[in-house]
Image (cartoon, helix red, strand yellow):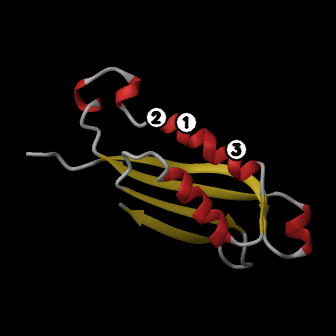
Amino acid sequence: MSQPDAMIRIKNLRLRTFIGIKEEEIANRQDVIVNVVIHYPADKARNSEDINDALNYRTITKSIIRHIEDNRFSLLEKLTQDVLDIAREHHWVTYAEVEIDKLHALRYADSVSMTMSWRR
């Protein structure tokens, strides 16, 4: 009997990037908050102490940070899809979900967020 997938959650990853289409957004980095959920079987890792038997969330997070900080984005949709692509890269991943908050995007709101998911 197989067990349900393990879930990795990367919570409230706070980064700065160029996001938006207005002149001030193109000229200045803005704060974004990234949340990622990744499901994978973790069959080997459940009974092991070997990092090679687990999905390395540090490697995934470093890729996300590098991509967000080293690029410019006009649309929150494109940024979210790019991060989702990174989250689902490993062949063990069965499900991935990404939510990105663009802080202070609207005057009376804390943020505007975009969520996208993918299932194998």
The residue sitting at 88% across, 60% down in the picture is 28
Rendered residue at 66%/68% (across/down): 78
The reply to whether dot 1 and dot 2 touch (C-beta < 8 Å) is yes
Count of numbered tags: 3
Amino acid under label 1? Thr
Mark 1 to mark 2: distance in Å? 6 Å
Report crowding for label 1: few under 14, some 14 to 19, many 20 or more residues within 10 A (C-alpha): few
Residue found at the very far left of the displayed protein: 1
| Mark 1: secondary structure | helix
- Circle 1 is placed at which residue position? 59
Residue 56 has which mark?
2
Badge 3 element: helix
Amino acid beneath label 3? Arg
- Residue in the foreground of this view, choosing between 99 and 62: 62
- Residue 66, which numbered label? 3
Locate residue 23: give its quadrant. bottom right
- Work out how far the residue at label 1 is from the one at label 3, CA to CA, in angstroms: 11 Å
Q: Is residue 103 left or right of residue 4?
A: right
Q: Which one is in front, 42 or 99?
A: 42
Which amino acid type is shown beneath numbered disc 2?
Asn
Residue 42 occupies quadrant: top left
